[in-house]
Image (spheres, rainbow, N blue to C red):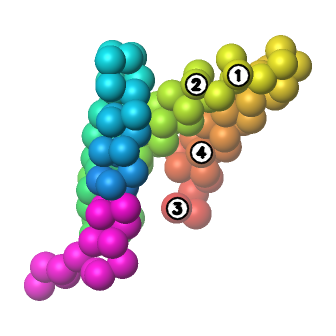
Amino acid sequence: MERQWSGLTKLGFGVLACNSALAIYKSWGDTGSVAFVLAADAALVVLFLCLREFERAGRGRDSTKIKAAVWTLTTLLTAMFASRVAPLMPPAAGAVVWLMAVATAAAGFFAFFLNNNL
């Protein structure tokens, strides 16, 4: 039986939609910022759907493809946000932001693909 989306999930998507609409409104005319918001939203929605599918798949063979999609999307989002935050900081702090982004992606790769507990 297919599970329905919970009220909390619907609320989260509603907050995301309102926040994104406000961000697009405030950055209207800046094509890069609008594209960033739309790309981040699309990646978040696809990531959510992949996570739901991952929960359903369990430990089967198909879960490796879903793990790859989840890791790719989370790494993409991490790099997207680091690329927007790091230039706003002093160079040393920007380097730390990128270092943390790389460490997060590497830890996710280890957890999904090299660790046999998932």
Residue 31's spot in the image, x, y percent? Answer: 33, 16
- Look at label 4 and name its amino acid: Gly
Q: Foreground residue, 111 or 27?
A: 27
- Look at label 1 and name its amino acid: Leu
Is 53 positioned to the left or the right of 15 in the image? Answer: left
Circle 3: element type? loop
Q: Quadrant of residue 30?
A: top left
Residue that appears at 56% across and 32% down: 81
Q: CA distance from mark 1 to mark 3?
A: 36 Å
Q: CA distance from mark 4 to mark 2?
A: 21 Å
Labels in figure, total: 4
Residue that appears at 48% across and 42% down: 74
- Magenta segment, principal secondary structure? helix
Identify the residue under disc 4.
108
Residue farthest to the left?
1
- Disc nearest the viewer among 4 and 1: 1
Q: 50 above or below 72?
A: below
Give the crowd class for mark 4: few <14, some 14-19, many >=20 residues within 10 Å.
some
Q: CA distance from mark 3 to mark 2?
A: 31 Å
Give the crowd class for mark 2: few <14, some 14-19, many >=20 residues within 10 Å.
few
Residue 47's spot in the image, x, y percent? Answer: 35, 49
- Look at label 2 and name its amino acid: Arg
Mark 1 vs 3, N-terminal side = 1
- Look at label 3 and name its amino acid: Leu
Mark 4 vs 2, N-terminal side = 2
Residues rendered magenta in the picture: 1-15
Residue 11's spot in the image, x, y percent? Answer: 33, 72
Q: CA distance from mark 3 to mark 4?
A: 11 Å
Q: Split into 4 quadrants, where in the image is the N terminus?
A: bottom left
- Per the rendering, the mark at residue 84 is 2
Circle 4: element type? helix
